Image (tube, rainbow, N blue to C red):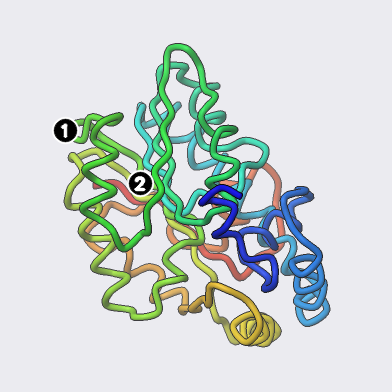
Amino acid sequence: MTDIESRIDTSRPHTARIWNYWTGGKDNYPVDREAGDRIRQLHPGIGEYAKADRLFLGRAVRHLACEAGIRQFLDIGTGLPSADNTHEVAQRVAPDARVVYVDNDPLVLAHARALLVGTPQGRTDYLDADLRDVDTILAAASKTLDLSQPVALMLLGVVIFVEDDEESYAIVRRLMDALAPGSHLVLSHTVTHPDMPDVDAAVAFWNEHGTPKLTQRTPAAVARYFDGLELLEPGVVSCSAWRPETPADDVAMYAGVGRK
């Protein structure tokens, strides 16, 4: 057994693997599928959140590559490889785009090779690091990315794992402070909302049975991550409502894109 394999715990459901299950992937275990089905019983629409978040990623990356001319992406909290990963979307538009993925999940690491196959003109790299390891991330990412030039910082569904509000805001600020003017923040976050009480029940079930535990925040609290940035239209909204190709129902994943 490799060191990575020894770190994979199949006895408890895991967020990345349940997300993979909900989006039709195969990189999950019975314990993940059982928990995923139980969460869906509590909140039948929650499986759509994963799909909506993935579609938001694609729309945001295409906008940044096409309209904003961004050629560098730092994707922290990558999750398991799926269709239309950040480098695939970006390099489809700009073959010379560079992407650095960051995650600390051993199953994601085991599949990282799939994330490293990009275009010959561009570059992709993968870091084994935690979101909190800001200095480590920046130092390692700078070997692939030119931090003196604009970078898109991708934080999709990852700051939810930092329980303390001020710590989570400080992490995002430190990362953005290290990036050049013209850089963008792309962030999505599970929210608590009075119109969606069943989401709270699903999150409570998850935090009792799964790992890692997650923190919900209000839409206003999510908007705070963009303080000091130029928030792109339509602002911080349900990720399904961020420049959709076709109208879609709101989900309890809110997202936005801001420019430094």
The answer to whether 179 appears left or right of 159 in the picture is: left
The residue under label 2 is which amino acid type?
Answer: Leu
The residue that appears at 51% across and 29% down in the rendered structure is 116
- As measured in the structure, the alpha-carbon distance from the residue carrying label 2 to the one carrying label 1 is 14 Å
Query: Could you say where residue 107 lies in the image, as x and y percent from the top left?
Result: 59, 52
The answer to whether 123 appears left or right of 118 in the picture is: left
The residue under label 1 is which amino acid type?
Answer: Ser
Q: What is the quadrant of residue 161 in the picture?
A: bottom left
The residue that appears at 57% across and 63% down in the rendered structure is 238
Query: Could you say where residue 76 lies in the image, as x and y percent from the top left?
Result: 41, 50
Q: Nearer the viewer, residue 91 or 70?
A: 91
154 to 12, vertically: above or below: above
Residue 230 visible, this angle = yes
Q: Can you identify the residue that label 2 sits on? A: 153
The residue that appears at 29% across and 38% down in the rendered structure is 141
Query: Could you say where residue 179 lies in the image, as x and y percent from the top left?
Result: 21, 43
Query: Could you say where residue 113 lies in the image, as x and y percent from the top left?
Result: 56, 33
Q: Badge 2: few (under 14), some or many (20 or more) residues near its Cα, within 10 Å?
A: many
Helix, strand or loop status at disc 1: loop
Question: What's the mark number on residue 148?
Answer: 1
